[in-house]
Amino acid sequence: MTFTTWTRRIVAAALAAALGLTTGLGPAAALDRTPLAAGGPRLAQAPAATQQRTYAMRDLGRLQNWTFTPGLTEAFETPLSESEPSPQTANREAVTQGWNRAAQRLLAFNHRVSAAAIERYAAGPARYTCDAAAASCSYQQFMTPIRNQGRCSSCWVFATLGAWEGTYALRYGIRVDASEQQVLTCTGRGNSCAGGFWGDALALMSATPIGAETTQPYTAKAGSCRANPASPYKVAAWGFINTANTPPSVATLKQALAERGPIIAGIYATPAFAAYTGGVFNEMASGGIDHAVVIIGWDDRRGAWRVRNSRGAQWGEAGYAWVAYGTNNIGAWATWVRPAAPGANQIEQTTLRIAALREAGRARLGQVWSQYRMLR
């Protein structure tokens, strides 16, 4: 079902309910008006039109055999208009293949530059990893508390740092909270509160270190970039899991989670996803991705991925969701990230300063030598 068709059906059901009529969705009187588990109090205080939309959504879910419960969430009540977070390019496979080759070189460079920090924090296998052959696995214990992007379409920022922070804790045993605000204001390239792409955020963090949340707290508004080269957090390398124009297979994504940790991914986030309050999200809508999330695990019994969102702890299951394999383009542009080891930026900065001093010293020696030759 297309998004337009879906929207028309929701509107038709809402109007029918308001007028006491019936539609192809069933009689208005049959709308499920029982309290919603995660939205009852909020729904009771909502305007009549919002209540009708919510009940119409639930009615549609029953008819479509959804295995999740829609309700009145902040995300559904105040929807964002997030722009397409993926770059639209005709030669996507060539671009992603080229970047993945560069990512391997970046990993090798990271091992050389920050050898001391890497040895200290065991940069080999992660402290805990999922087994790709397991029926279920989750990195939720390594994730930082759920955040709320507010009225800013900055899902691309929160997905980037959500995966980075989780992988940092997974690999180095340290839980940190990096500054989303700095990434939001410093990424540039057209990325803003109107939407963006996590690849640009990762490129920023590969070149420019960022600070902790306490240095630049999130405001849900764009602002002026305040970069600090001495900030502690960087990206060592990142890459795409699949270079084809489709999301990775379930097996491929499981293997990536096992080898890399939490994964940044796109999803087609319809109003039904915004209204999710629990269960397994299985809308099976088709459309381009317009939202970024973090995939942190899976459960074959549910047939679903464990997904971290950035719409607050009141959304979904305390900020998380189960998203059925293959639904709503989940996994599009799936991306892994390797955080630089703790202290790596300081070592890199010291290395660069030493190199600069050496270069200045050579230049000075060259000047002295030239003067000496002139005296002769």
Image (spheres, helix red, strand yellow):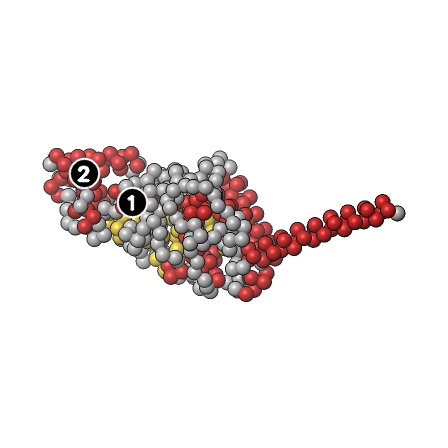
Name the residue beneath numbered marker 2: 49
Between 46 and 197, the one lying in front of the other is: 46
Q: Quadrant of residue 262?
A: bottom left
At x 62%, y 55%, the residue is 351
Which x, y percent locates residue 372?
83, 49
Residue 191 against residue 372 in the figure, above or below: above
Instruction: Name the mark on residue 75.
Output: 1
Dot 2 surroundings within 10 Å: few (below 14), some, or many (20 or more)?
A: few
What kind of residue is marked 2? Ala
Question: Could you tell whether 340 is left or right of 218 in the image?
Answer: right
Question: Could you tell whether 141 is left or right of 14 in the image?
Answer: right
Label 2: element kind:
helix
Which x, y percent locates residue 194?
39, 38
Dot 1 surroundings within 10 Å: few (below 14), some, or many (20 or more)?
A: many
What kind of residue is marked 1? Ala
Question: Could you tell whether 173 is left or right of 72 in the image?
Answer: right
Between 284 and 206, the one lying in front of the other is: 206
